[in-house]
Image (cartoon, rainbow, N blue to C red):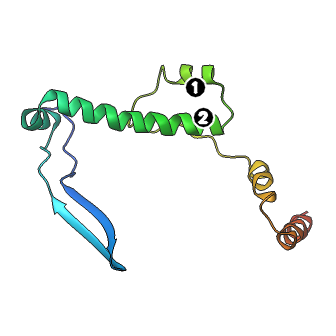
Amino acid sequence: MDETEEPAVETNTITAKGKKDEVEHTISVIYDFGEVLEDSVDMFGGALVHAKFKASAKIDGQAKIRRDVGAGKSAEEIQESFLTWKPGMPTERKAKDPVDVLIGKWKDMTEDDRANMLRRLKAAE
């Protein structure tokens, strides 16, 4: 590997959990995906590797859109944010306002839960 290549990440183990007849199973298998991109392209072909990349990147993009909508961004703001977005790279996430979180939960709370919450809030003053 030359110095411009990134070290390979161990990704050859596939693990899944399932349930059959009320019994939980966790199964792991080893599958050779190749060690680096070039290996994968040699093994599976560039078209398949690119198609799988695009499918995964679309899922990442959908998650970003949902987060942005939840943060109140407009369609135009979201589109603009994709100009610098890179699939698979962490994005800055803004913490949710705790008051907004409480307001969002308020409608689902019982009267007792609301009364307890009000008591706790008053005690925190």
Residue assigned mark 2? 68
Q: Is residue 4 left or right of residue 85?
A: left
Q: Secondary structure at mark 1?
A: helix
Residue 121 percent coordinates (x, y)? 87, 64
Compare marks 2 and 1 and give the one earlier in the sequence.
Answer: 2
With respect to residue 32, does 71 lie above or below? above
* Residue type at tag 1: Ile
> In the orientation shown, which residue stands out farthest toward the front?
21
Q: Secondary structure at mark 2?
A: helix
Image quadrant where one finds the C terminus: bottom right
- What residue is at 37 percent from the left and 34 percent from the top? 57
Residue assigned mark 1? 78
Residue 24 percent coordinates (x, y)? 34, 76
Q: In the drawing, what numbered circle is on residue 29? A: none
Q: Who is closer to the viewer here, 12 or 3?
A: 12
Q: Is residue 58 left or right of residue 36?
A: right
Q: Is residue 27 left or right of residue 45?
A: right
